[in-house]
Image (cartoon, rainbow, N blue to C red):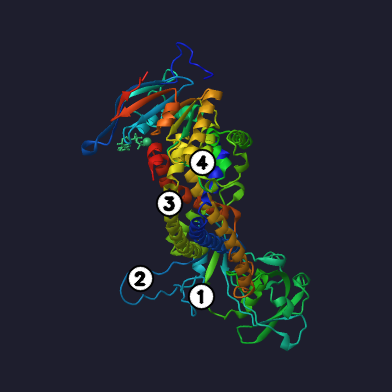
Amino acid sequence: MTSAPAPGAPPVLSAQALTKTYGTGQSRFDALKGVSIDVHRGESLAIVGKSGSGKSTLMHLLALLDRPTTGAVEIDGEDAASAPAKRINHLRNDRFGFVFQQFFLTAQQSVLENVTLPLLVAGVPPRERARRGMAALDSLGLADKARNRANDLSGGQKQRVVIARALVNEPDVIFADEPTGNLDTATGTQVEDILFGLQRERGITLVVVTHDEDLAERCDRRVTIADGLITDGAGR
Amino acid sequence: MRTADVIGNAARNAFRSRLRTTLTVLSLFVGAFTLTLTTALGAGVNEYVATQVATVSTGDALLVAPAVASETTEGPTPFEADGRQQATQPNPLGSGTLLNAADLETMRGLDGVDLVEPVRMITLDWVAADGADEDARFELDINPSSSLGRSDLVAGDQLDNGTDAAQVVLQEDYVAALGFDDAESAIGETVELGYTDAAQAEQTIEAEVAGIARTSLFAAGAGTNESLTDAVTEAQAIPGQPEAYVLAVAHLDGTGPDGAVTDQDVDDVKALLADADLTGQTVEDQLGVIQTVINGIIGVLSAFSVIALLAASFGIVNTLLMSVQERTREIGLMKAMGMSDGRVFSLFSLEAVVIGFLGSAIGAAVAIGLGTVISSALAAGPLADLPGLTILLFDPVNVLLVIVVIMLVAFLSGVLPARRAARQDPIDSLRYE
Ligand SMILES: Nc1ncnc2c1ncn2[C@@H]1O[C@H](COP(=O)(O)OP(=O)(O)OP(=O)(O)O)[C@@H](O)[C@H]1O
Ligand SMILES: [Mg+2]
């Protein structure tokens, strides 16, 4: 690790006593029942647990994609609950990169257009978008595929495009939900290598949700979720 | 997201599903096409009527006729020795009752009336070039109001009522018949006019051609100036018969700046005339009825195109709802990446506007193209008798207005789907299978 957290610096992400309840009445379901967790700058954190235990829910709350029922999330010490929607949008756009459980590529668009989507949202001018998109693709060895339709790539290539999209805006934190779930072991390992390479070389913080023991093993730290509570590994 | 990118992406997204968009555009096309044509028809006909009004109206005169008698008692109307005469033949300008000398005196005595000229009907039998043979004579209709109105001239000047010389304004189709090279060369030439006097004797009179007029909807027939009318009227008057006129023209005193006749002046005199059992109408009043009818017909036609547009707008709603549905994940992704609700809304509503623009612009363009062809074909064929009539008049302002209105309709249709997209929860969208 190139950037060990400075002593006393606030964690990048800090969650206190998060609960998340879906539905009401009969269909009421507590997906999270009080989770507190800190994510430090530059570290890689694995969130593991059985299917349906609440891993994705926790990641969504940490990534400010959703608001907790109770509890608070802080970004660099700034309380997210009190921030206006515009600020939250900006934080996500500027500081976070996302790799979701599915690829979520727009099939008819070119690879380059898919990769530069966060820059398009940010309002970066077209030329600059293309330049940074090409740089991101280049770092993942996909520069020659930039003009292809996203649909025409193999599964492994698609996942690399998704990672290029996650890092094109030079985020502080990359959230990855099952980044290797759809890939075979060899390709999965290749994608893992890329992610840990980014953490090592660029000091990007990784929050990885996974079933995969090997992937969890490679992370600096892991927490296990069961029935909406942390059952193993220190939250802080 | 930059505004230019929003517009660019909206336009591109509109064409992601090419067939669907094309069909929606087509339904808008139908509405835009008919709306452009009906507004053009309205503009064309109204424009024509307006220029025709200008040819017959001097703006400061009222056409006065006896008020239509309203029977208040049952049974036959009692005879009055000095009452008005009934016309022996129907005439289009006045009512069945004729004006008499007393009526003219009454009018002259009204406040606000400057001058009263009775309209006299004269009948001419033929017209011929000066010194022409008997077989080169042509029948001639006289427009009774020609001495007061102005003609839509192609050459020469309006009739001069101040001169002692007899003048005529002839219609365009007499130019060649009377042996003139063109309208211009007929001006100032003398023609011979034949009529029958009160004693049934044939008479001829010479007149100078003052102008050549375009055939017009409301001023059909040749025009004669006062001096010519006087001469013929005198010869045709049956001795001993009291004066009777179909119509009189009351020229008004203006109280406005520079002696201009204001609407108030016209209304005042109309009220006074009504008290005297007379009715006064401006030429505009008379033509207003025609315009109301035309506008009514155009309105009904336009209503049909509006119905077509309404149907098309549901098409837009449907198209965009499908588009939003299909792109649920993409919307979720963009929102996860920090795109604001407002921008998502703009992206989809602009897509609707793009569809609206395409439909309306293509519809208007085709309407103009086809309409111009039809219009000139009609002008050369069935409508050749109404020169100066452009049946379909494509006013750029109207065309632009049609396009803007349809784009607005499209935008409004896009509101519901766009709102649905904007309100989508990114998490739900990303979970969407
Ligand atoms: N919108 C929702 N409405 C109702 N229940 C929900 C909703 N979203 C999630 N849940 C429930 O919350 C629980 C946690 O879901 P979550 O997606 O966090 O699981 P997970 O740990 O990521 O599982 P997996 O490993 O299968 O992805 C599940 O039981 C799920 O059914
Ligand atoms: Mg999950």
Q: Chain of mark 2?
A: B
State the mark number for residue B91. 1
Quadrant of the rendered image containing residue B367? bottom right
Determine if marks 2 and 1 fall on one subunit.
Answer: yes
Residue at image coords 42%, 50% = B321
The mark closer to the camera, 4 or 1, is 4
Determine if marks 3 and 1 fall on one subunit.
Answer: yes
Q: Real-space Cα distance between discs 4 and 1?
A: 93 Å
Residue B125 or residue A204, whichever sits in front: A204
- Helix, strand or loop at label 4? It is helix
Sequence-first tag of 3 and 1: 1
Residue B353 or residue B153, whichever sits in front: B353
Q: Residue tagged by mark 4?
A: A156
- Helix, strand or loop at label 3? It is helix
Q: Quadrant of ligand 2?
A: top left
Sequence-first tag of 3 and 2: 2
- State the image coordinates of residue B131 (x, y, percent, origin top left): 78, 83
- Circle 2 residues within 10 Å: few <14, some 14–19, many ≥20: few
Q: What's the amino acid at mark 2?
A: Glu
Q: Residue tagged by mark 3?
A: B322
Q: What's the amino acid at mark 1?
A: Asn
Determine if marks 3 and 2 fall on one subunit.
Answer: yes
Q: Residue tagged by mark 2?
A: B71
CB contact under 8 Å: marks 3 and 2: no
Q: Is residue A18 left or right of residue A124?
A: left
Q: Real-space Cα distance between discs 2 and 1?
A: 21 Å
- State the image coordinates of residue B432 (x, y, percent, origin top left): 38, 43
With respect to residue A75, does A132 lie above or below?
A: below
With respect to residue B160, does A217 lie above or below?
A: above
Q: What's the amino acid at mark 3?
A: Met
